[in-house]
Amino acid sequence: MTDDTGTTGTTAIRVHLPTHLRKLAHLDGELTLDVPGAVTIGAALDALETRYPVLKGTIRQHGGGKRRAFVRFFACEQDLSHEPQDTPLPEPVIRGTEPLMVIGAMAGG
């Protein structure tokens, strides 16, 4: 349970992963993830990597935790990919009405 600021306890958020990451983690569809403390981009990714260690290094680089080049984060029709990891997630994500989406970008020619 969280207070009005979202900084205590845990908050359940919805997370949508691309197919290849769901297969790697043996997941079907969207998942619900408990995020402790303030619900930020980094806290959500920390909780995801803690629950599914096989995903470490697939979304963020090992060590520094920087987002991988071909991975994007979206929520509430906003591109959060270039936001600092301590950026709070949008209120609808915190309330559980909208998911945090991790998208694998396409490249090639």
Image: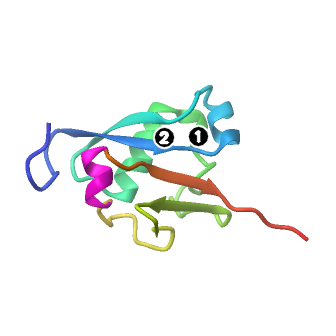
Element assignment for label 2? helix
Between marks 2 and 1, how big is the CA–CA gap? 6 Å
95 falls in the magenta region: yes
Q: Are marks 2 and 1 in contact (CB under 8 Å)?
A: yes
- Return the disc, 2 or 1, that comes first in the chain's sequence: 2
Q: Position of residue 76 (x, y in %)?
A: 40, 61
Q: Is residue 107 left or right of residue 30?
A: right
- Which residue is rendered at x = 40% and y = 71% of the image? 84
| Amino acid carrying mark 2 in the image | Glu
- Which residue is rendered at x = 35% and y = 51% of the image? 43
Residue that label 1 marks: 55
Q: Quadrant of the N terminus?
A: top left
- Which residue is rendered at x = 50% and y = 58% of the image? 65
Q: Is residue 62 visible?
A: no
Q: Position of residue 98 (x, y in %)?
A: 37, 50
Vertical arrangement, residue 73 with respect to residue 19, above or below: below
Q: Position of residue 15 (x, y in %)?
A: 45, 43
| Amino acid carrying mark 1 in the image | Leu
Which of 50/34 is in front?
A: 34
Q: Is residue 96 visible?
A: yes
User: Magenta region: which residues?
Assistant: 90-96
Residue that label 2 marks: 49
Q: Quadrant of the C terminus?
A: bottom right
Crowd band around label 1 with a 10 angstrom C-alpha radius: few (<14), some (14–19), many (20+): some
